[in-house]
Amino acid sequence: MAKVKSLKGLGAGHGIKIRKNWTKIHFQLKQERICPECGSKTFGRDAVGIWSCKKCSYKVAGTAYDIKL
Ligand SMILES: [Zn+2]
């Protein structure tokens, strides 16, 4: 029973963490990005894990919320 009590405490803390993390993700998605191919600022997330440039159609696979370059 002691285990259940400690898990409850962790659950509450976790909820706040996720909310803070979401704010971070939200800013990451809105952030202006530069296309690595043509330098245009129209580079953004096309779909989950796919980032593309509207100008030159350059596509790159990344994570759901950010690109790995
Ligand atoms: Zn481009």
Image (tube, rainbow, N blue to C red):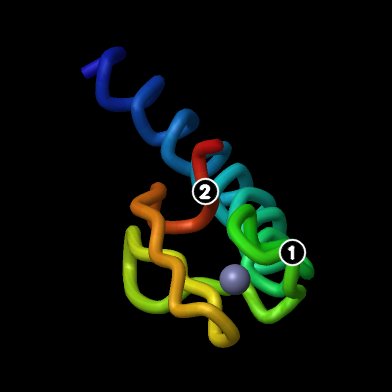
Say which of 8 and 1 sits in front: 8
7 is higher (above) or lower (below) than 52 = above
Most extreme residue toward the top is 2
Say which of 67 and 28 sits in front: 67
- Asked whether, in this view, residue 34 is left or right of residue 61, the answer is right
Q: Amino acid at mark 2?
A: Ile
Dot 1 or dot 2: first in sequence order is 1
- Asked whether, in this view, residue 10 is left or right of residue 37, the answer is left
2 is higher (above) or lower (below) than 7 = above
Q: Amino acid at mark 1?
A: Gly
| Place of residue 60 in the rendered image (x, y in percent of width and height, measured from the top left) | 40, 56
Residue, disc 1 = 39
Residue 23: image quadrant is: bottom right
Residue 41: image quadrant is: bottom right
Q: Which mark is residue 60?
A: none
Residue, disc 2 = 67
Report whether the residue tagged 1 is closer than 8 Å to ligand 1: yes
Ligand 1 position by quadrant:
bottom right
| Place of residue 55 in the rendered image (x, y in percent of width and height, measured from the top left) | 59, 85
| Place of residue 13 in the rendered image (x, y in percent of width and height, measured from the top left) | 57, 37
Mark 1 and 2 residues: CB-CB less than 8 Å, in contact? no
| Place of residue 58 in the rendered image (x, y in percent of width and height, measured from the top left) | 45, 68
Picture residue at 60% right of the left edge, 43% below the top: 17
Picture residue at 40% right of the left edge, 48% below the top: 63
Say which of 45 and 69 sits in front: 69
Picture residue at 78% right of the left edge, 69% below the top: 32
Considering the numbered disc 1 on the image, is that residue within a helix, a strand or a loop?
Answer: loop
Residue 7: image quadrant is: top left
Q: Residues within 10 Å of mark 2 (few under 14, many from 20)?
A: some
7 is higher (above) or lower (below) than 30 = above
Considering the numbered disc 2 on the image, is that residue within a helix, a strand or a loop?
Answer: loop
